[in-house]
Amino acid sequence: MKHQNRFQCVLMFFSFSCIFSPQYTFGFGKLASVSSAVDESDGEIREKDKSHSHHHYHGCNCSECYDDDNDGFFSKLFAVGITSPWWIPPIALADNSAESGKFLSTPYQNNHHGLMDIEPFGEFNSQQVQFRFLADYGSDFSGLTRIGGQFEVDTASRLGFETSWNQFQEDLGTTTDELWLGDANITWRFAQNEAMQFHTGVGLNWLNDASNTDTGFNFTYGFDLFPVKPWVFRGTMDLGRLGDTSRVHFRGDVGLVWKHFEIFTGYNLERISNVNLQGVSAGIQFRF
């Protein structure tokens, strides 16, 4: 009877573990879900959804419901809204694209407001090219950690290049899972003034795990703001594909600069398919 009671207790404990912590019980966590989603084609699902919605659609067509004037108005309104992230910043920063800009050797150099020197140039030790290297560590405090790095080149011609890489590790109790994720993009600084710069660009996403390497298209958009010494605010968004699924990335940082160095903290979110890899982060950055 005692042995039977012990067996029942062990069985109940194992059942509760499976229900409430399946990743620890079976060694299947967020990173494994990401790898599975990237390698699994979702084309058939989209076709089924499309066919299903078409089969149950009994409404009228657009020509029967709206006249051409309303159709044209809403199309223009949509076009204005969807393109606003590219035409509003140049207007807000009074950037006419004709004025050249150079980079100060350090942000807030000689109490100058910001990072850039816009013509007519002042008496600063400005430069045509700026390099930036970033390293940080992040965690969700639930077993998922990230070590990341980024390298960026920006030029007075507004053309640039940036690449980033991240090592994710997940504690599964009895084992540890790992994958690498990153991107590389050609960028264009489409809006600028002394204190704020906007970048956009296109490039390549990549993911590497124990079994495979997958790639996909990437679009990036971001800004750097130097409001007042010694503060800096930074935001980045990436949208694209990885293998057979989608990638959405948001990042926001707040930093303090001292000469060539910066320390910062922020939040990083990677959403691949329906899996979120997210957490707070802290790191250092070096400009030269």
Image (cartoon, helix red, strand yellow):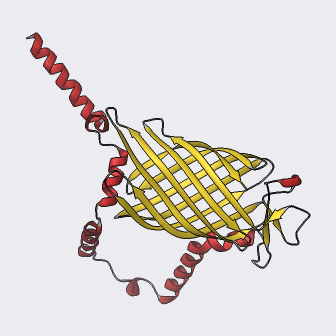
Is residue 173 or residue 278 the one in the foreground? 173
Left or right of residue 174: residue 129? right
Is residue 275 shown above or below 219?
Answer: above
Looking at the rendering, which quadrant does residue 271 occupy? bottom left
The quadrant of the picture occupied by the C terminus is bottom right
User: Foreground: 228 or 143?
Assistant: 143
Q: Residue at image x 26%, y 72%?
A: 47
- Residue 130 found in image quarter: bottom right
Q: Residue lying farthest top?
A: 2
Residue 184 in picture, x, y percent from top left: 53, 64
Residue 113 in the figure: left or right of residue 69: right
Q: How many marks?
A: 0
Screen quadrant of the N terminus: top left
In the picture, measured across the screen, residue 168 lies left or right of residue 258, that is left
Q: Extreme right residue here?
A: 123
Identify which residue, 77 or 274, lies in the foreground: 274
Q: Position of residue 257 (x, y in %)?
A: 75, 47
Please say if 27 is above or below 219.
Answer: above
Q: Is residue 181 above or below residue 117?
A: above
Give how far across and how far down residue 215 sits, in percent: 41, 64
Rendering quarter of residue 256? top right
As rendered, which of 192 and 68 lies closer to the eye? 192
Please tell me whether residue 72 is drawn above or below residue 203 in the rendered image.
Answer: below
Could you tell me which residue is drawn at 64 percent across and 69 percent down?
Answer: 160
Q: Is residue 68 left or right of residue 210?
A: right
Q: Which residue is pictured at 31% across the width and 77% down the height?
A: 59
Q: Position of residue 209 (x, y in %)?
A: 36, 52
**Which residue is situated farthest in the left direction here?**
1
